[in-house]
Image: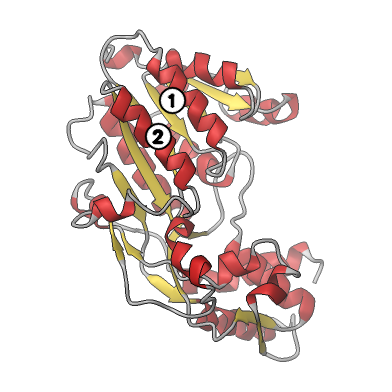
Amino acid sequence: MANNTDLKIFYTGATGYLGGDAWALLIEKHPEWEARSTLLVRNEERAKVVQAKYPGARLVFGDLSDSTLLETEAANADIVVHCASIEDPHSSQALSNGLAKRRRDGSAYWVALSGTDNITWRTIEEGSYGTSYDHVYDDMDRVSEATSLPDQAPHRDVEKIQQQCITQNPSVKLAIVCPSCVYGVGEGCGNERSIQLPELAKYTIENSYAFKVGQGLCRWPNIHVRDHSRIVLSLIEDAMQGGTHATWGKDGYYFAENGEHVWGDIAHLVAEEAKKEGLVDNASVKSFSAEEIDTQLDFGSAFYGTDSRCKAKRARQVLGWRPQQDSLEAEIARAVTIEGRSLGK
């Protein structure tokens, strides 16, 4: 890798929810890195917002379908942080191709995001929506289980591209961060809103009742957006120092969670808060099948009816990471208030 003062970062997703918050934290802690960074932005409108807040960063215009641009920028970078769509295999392949062509001295570091819906594959395969399993994935003692999920698992195609990259190019060091149900208001310069908790609150206010899928017993891990950003920051900082502390490579897999919740319980808490704020008359929760909720909400069964259980051991034990933000339950009142206001209530 080049001298620390010459390192270059290529960053995607800087105006997104997760990527925007992580980028904001990175520059808050290390403002000198702004001038070393290239950000991918889609258009002039987004560029104006980014430039106003981060005038020192270099911007390139394009989207995740622009393979040539992604390859070129990855080939010229020392650290690639890919916080844009975790569903898109083409962009990961382009970044992989670029890193393979890289001619700068030393190792390259690739920090990529996935998501714990990848470990919901069993619910989807068995159709057991609304129920829970005892099995809890582990990114430390049983990390190979998390990095060798069945091909039908969500995001598996993307992760296989990333893993193949480091197998074929030993000078590329990979770390995959796998966020869970992320909550909290993002502090980036673009999207500040998460999906699962806000959409549940919005649905409750619009329909005057909350919902659960089946029995509502399925569980998900959760994490505040800023606590997630701290994991990403720790990995970028380690890459800047030559990757001597964090785990990189085939075992460089980091779940991001601060406990877990039962979706049926969260639905009741949201309904109770909505009633408390005068947004609904009754704190009721209705049960729907996976098929029924999918006709009402995009990815409804996937987000609220699957079982996703894991422990973020590696971030805690290797990076020394400790969650600092409020719990998901403590965020419910704020989420309900925000969604109520956005609906004009």
Q: Nearer the viewer, residue 192 or 182?
A: 182
Amino acid carrying mark 1 in the image: Ser
* Relative image position of residue 250 (x, y in whole percent): 26, 39
Calculate the distance from the C-alpha at mark 1 to the C-alpha at mark 2: 7 Å
**Residue 10, image x and y in percent?**
47, 23
In the drawing, what numbered circle is on residue 282?
Answer: none
Q: Quadrant of residue 292?
A: bottom right
Quadrant for the C terminus, please: bottom right
Nearest the camera: 289 or 27? 289
- Residue at 49 percent across and 72 percent down: it is 126
Q: Quadrant of the N terminus?
A: top left
Q: Mark 2 sits on what residue? A: 162
Above/below status of 330 relative to 190: below
Q: Is residue 215 left or right of residue 150?
A: right
Kindly identify which numbered label has been placed on residue 96.
1
Instruction: Give the secondary structure at mark 1.
Output: helix
Q: Residue at x 48, y 58 (%)?
A: 117
Circle 2 SS class: helix
Q: Amino acid at mark 2?
A: Gln
Q: Viewer-proximal residue, 171 or 330?
A: 171
